Image (cartoon, rainbow, N blue to C red):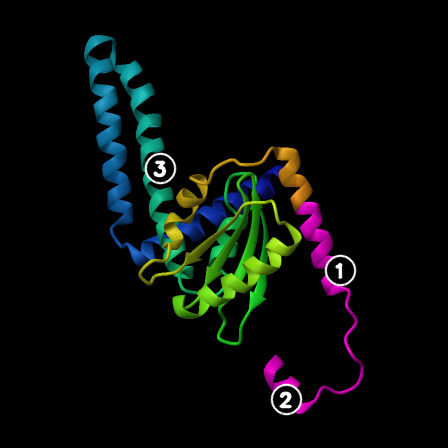
Amino acid sequence: MARLSGIKSRFSTIAENFRMAKSGRPTLAWEMAGMFLAVGAILAAPLWIFINWPTGIIVGIPAGAIAAMFWFSRVAMKSAYKSIEGQPGAAAAVIESMRGNWTITPAVAVTRNQDLVSRVVGRCGVILVGEGAPSRVVALLATERKKTARWLPDIPIYEMQVGTEEGQIRISRLQKEMGKMPKNLRPAEATDIRRRLDALSQRQSAIPLPKGPLPRQSRSSRG
């Protein structure tokens, strides 16, 4: 029963992704059918002619199905990126689901304009990922870089701006850009940096807040 429930959940997820992708691309079903027929026919025809027709069918149908699903996954991914692009925290969400040995701490710095910086640790060192208006994020990244360098003076620190404006990285290209980062550290060194930064975050979060009602200015700032 547990396996059946898992299969149902997987099909439900696929169906939901298909509806989402089709809403932005109404011709998706026809495109998938075209990919299935084209790839299946290209691979099946030579086998049908030079070997026999059952071999052509056995090879052509799975190959066409794989091609159709590959096309669907690409369209669904683009649709998912488009649906979250420009939202605060979108870059952090993408990095959390990204392949590779990345550890992200979302929103280590946030402003009331919803500009934010997230901190990523990997084999390259530390990457500060900024989201928001470029004119404001530059200063936010610079401040967070100084704070990080104070605790990790010998570790490479990189900066990225994710967004849709000029000079920023589109969220659909984020994984490709992260994959280009150099491997400056050994895995054990990257793990040590993660632990040090985690300890720092816990130490900062453990600072006691003053008791009693907040002053009016503090309330408005917090809001």
Q: Nearer the viewer, mark 3 or mark 2?
A: 2
Q: Which residue lies under the disc numbered 1?
A: 203
Q: Quadrant of residue 32?
A: top left
Does the magenta run of residues contain 222? Answer: yes
For the residues bearing labels 3 and 1, Cβ distance under 8 angstroms: no
Residue at x 45% of width, y 66% of height: 137
Q: Along the horizontal axis of the image, is 155 left or right of 76? A: right
Label 1 to label 2: alpha-carbon separation: 26 Å
Q: Earlier in the sequence, mark 3 or mark 2?
A: 3
Q: Quadrant of residue 132?
A: bottom left
Mark 3 residue element: helix
Q: Which residues are magenta?
A: 194-223
Q: Could you say where residue 84 lies in the image, as x and y percent from the top left? A: 42, 60
Residue at x 73% of width, y 53% of height: 199
Q: Which residue lies under the disc numbered 3?
A: 70
In the picture as drawn, the residue positioned furthest to the bottom comes out as 216
Residue at x 45% of width, y 46% of height: 14
Mark 2 residue element: helix
> Identity of the amino acid at label 3?
Phe
Q: Is residue 84 visible?
A: yes
Q: Which residue lies under the disc numbered 2?
A: 217
Q: Quadrant of residue 136?
A: bottom left
> Identity of the amino acid at label 1?
Arg
Label 3 to label 2: alpha-carbon separation: 54 Å
- Label 1 crowding class (10 Å Cα cut-off): few <14, some 14-19, many 20+? few
Q: Could you say where residue 39 lies in the image, as x and y percent from the top left? A: 25, 29
Q: Could you say where residue 44 lies in the image, as x and y percent from the top left? A: 25, 20
Q: Nearer the viewer, residue 171 or 50?
A: 171
Badge number at residue 109 = none
Residue at x 53% of width, y 61% of height: 117
Q: Nearer the viewer, residue 30 or 161?
A: 161
